[in-house]
Amino acid sequence: MLNRYLRASEIANLLGVHVNTVWRWSSDEKKLAQGFPRPVKISNTVTAFSGSALEKFIKAKMPKPSPNAERVKRAAKN
C-alpha cells in the first residue's frame, strides 16, 4: 500500500500518461467521482496526491478476472 504522497510526475510515470493528463484528471468531476485522488497542497510550492487513494483508484479501474479464467488457464496447459 502506498502510504505516502505522490507528485503528479510520479503518478504520470506509474500510469503511463503525461503529467498534464494527471492535472486534467484532478480537476475533472467525472474522474474525481470515479475515485481519482484530489490534489493536496503540502506547501506554497508543493502539491501532491494521496498514494493510498491512487492505489484504490487503480484497483477499481482494473478489469475483474473472468469466472472462467482459471479453467481457461488449465485447458491451455494441456
Image (cartoon, helix red, strand yellow):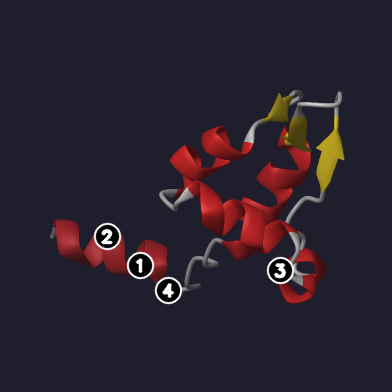
Mark 4 and mark 2: Cα distance apart in space: 10 Å
Q: Is residue 58 visible?
A: yes
Do residues under tags 2 and 1 come within 8 Å of each other at their CB atoms?
yes
Q: In the current view of this chain or complex, which residue is farthest to the front?
A: 44
Do residues under tags 1 and 4 come within 8 Å of each other at their CB atoms?
yes
Q: Which mark is residue 31?
A: 3
Residue at 64% across, 32% down: 7
Mark 3 and mark 1: Cα distance apart in space: 35 Å
Indicate the quadrant containing the C terminus: top left, top right, bottom left or bottom right: bottom left
The disc, 3 or 1, on the residue closer to the chain's N-terminal end is 3
Location of residue 31 by image quarter: bottom right
Identify which amino acid the numbered label 4 is placed on: Asn
Which residue is denoted by mark 1 in the rendering?
Answer: 71
- Could you tell whether 64 is left or right of 1 in the image? left
Q: Secondary structure at mark 4?
A: loop
Q: Secondary structure at mark 1?
A: helix
Instruction: Say above or below: 60 vs 7.
Output: below
Which residue is denoted by mark 2 in the rendering?
Answer: 74
Mark 2 and mark 1: Cα distance apart in space: 5 Å
Residue at 77% across, 44% down: 53
The disc, 4 or 2, on the residue closer to the chain's N-terminal end is 4
